[in-house]
Image (tube, coloured by chain):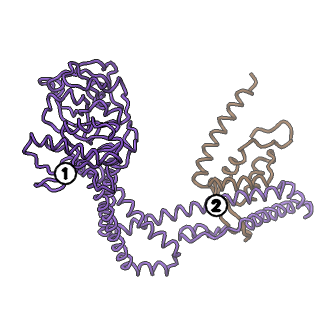
Chain colours: A purple, B brown
Amino acid sequence: MQPTRPRGIRRLLRLPAGKRPIAREIDDEIAFHFDETVAELVAQGLTPDDARREAAKRFGDLSQVRRDLRQIDSMSDRQERRQDRVGALAHDARYAVRALIKDRRVALFVIFTLMLGIGANATMFGIVDRLLLRPPPHVSDDPLLTTIYIRRESRDFGVFFGRSMSYPGYAALRDQSGVFSDVAAYWSTVASLGRGPNAVKVNAGLATANFFPMLGVRAELGRFFAPDEDRRNNPKPPAVLSHGFWARQFGSDPQILGREIQVNQAVYTIVGVAPAGFNGAGLYPTDMWIPMHAAAAEYTNATFDTYYDMRPDVAAARATATYQRVTRDARKSDSASSMLLASMVPARGVEGLSGVLTGKSGSGSLSARVSAWLSIVAAILLAIACANVANLLLLRAARRRREIAMRLALGISRARLAVQLLLESTILAALGGLAALALVPAATRLCARRSSAYWTSPPAS
Amino acid sequence: MPTSASNEPLELLQGTLDVLILKTLTWGPMHGYGVAHWIRQRTADALRIDDGALYTALHRLEHREWVQSEWGVTEQNRRAKFYSLTKQGRSALVQRTQQWTRYTTAVARVLRPA
């Protein structure tokens, strides 16, 4: 017995699988079986005819068996081809990794370049997504909700945009009938909670009572401020906790409503808890909100920030006139003001909540505009990175011409060669992407620190 | 192998043929006719096994990769397909043999006259 091993050799040398002649092999096998059986029976003394009948009887339903065998064998054949393909791919992947390790300087440079390009884009997209694209949780996406920006011209600083204005300016805008359906004011500040050694620093949002209904946000527990609570000399001012602060500081205590807390110099009563994810306006994490007027005693000289309006199209010109009149009046008593002219520029959405960029007026918050520009820069950076990588790989391919010619001469198919080269590129790209993934959180933290230091910090008052 | 009361050949229990084939192939690579011949001799014709069923079982075992096949040449210089056990086939045989022993012991315990 001397079995040859054609399939084993084919697999050893990774030769492509030909179509197996399944039907012929089965017929050969059965024919051999019948010949042997008949020979054996004849040797036992049967006539050839009887022997053939006996062999057929022993075999059973020949045509049924043949059909079954063909079905089983074609299943096996498909399975084997599949295994061959997977095996070939695994082999190509190993080959690609070896080739990359051999050329590791180029590989590392490519991965590094891709990491920078992809990482910068992912980081910027994350920031733009937060600043401009994503509607914040629990806030109604009202297309008329607008941030008012004030375009100011100053002898010393030229033209600049700002969101903050004095309280008299806000009050004048709010009381001017027929221009805005509602105007709310908001300001972020740092306060101390408690007294003595147990005091903790909290980020407090000062909001007018109409701020929350304007955003369409509902309290998770209790309520937000009532309009009559937002007044000066309220003996029992209310406070609303953010969901995170409620969980952190009070262990999500469901009996929290009605508890009194000391904030700065005043005692506030907790009347509600905001829904999870709601952060007021601005990008600072907010711990609690207190009525703007209740805190006014402690912030007598502050300018207040961010006004929201719901009818911007007809409003800008008339609001500007009002505001100019108010600030003119104010300047009479404030000779130090260097403002020459202020005009109102509405921008869609609420800073830190949703979109603030408007193309026409060229306004919008500085952080949003800078982010948008940085995104474009990041995209260009990626394009440059891609061009670099392509160049480098082209150079590498040119150096490998001899190797490739050799492998073609040894009989590798062009398709297989293309798969191998494509696998190398895919591995490089995947590693670059993974490296970028590791880079993004750090880069985002860095950007957030930078941006909060430079362009989302509240203007010094 | 217990002998039956009558001389009628026994119908084969489900899955038994696989074990018989695997066991036969432990003696070395064999073609289908060889397997059939060997089983018939060993069971002294006590089991009714169609040769066709044997081939179906062989090919099915090959699909499960318990046996593998190569075309070879017999001692009479004839081309034939030889089957041999794979590593999986060998461990499957061990496992099936244990199952079979447990099964027959359990049934025998019930059927033993009290």
Task: Classify residue A377 by image quadrant.
Answer: bottom left
The amino acid sitting under disc 1 is Arg
**For numbered disc 1, what is the local secondary structure?**
strand
Q: Position of residue A259 (x, y in %)?
A: 26, 18
Q: Quadrant of the C terminus of chain A?
A: top left
Q: Answer whether residue A435 is visible to the viewer in this image.
A: no
Other residues around mark 2 within 10 Å, as few (<14) / some (14–19) / many (≥20): few
Residue positioned most to the left: A335
A210 left or right of A81 in image: left
Location of mark 2 (residue): A78
Q: Answer whether residue A226 is visible to the viewer in this image.
A: yes
Residue closest to the eye, B42 or A281: A281
Q: Nearer the viewer, mark 1 or mark 2?
A: 1
The Cα atoms of the two marked residues, 1 and 2, are separated by 75 Å
Say which mark, if any, is on residue A152: 1
Say which mark, if any, is on residue B44: none
Q: Is residue A453 above or below residue A411?
A: above
**For numbered disc 2, what is the local secondary structure?**
helix
The amino acid sitting under disc 2 is Arg
Task: Classify residue A372 by image quadrant.
Answer: bottom left
Q: Position of residue A44 (x, y in %)?
A: 86, 59
Q: Position of residue A252 (x, y in %)?
A: 32, 25
Q: Is residue A372 above or below residue B71?
A: above
Q: Quadrant of the N terminus of chain A?
A: bottom right
Label 1 vs 2, first from the N-terminus: 2
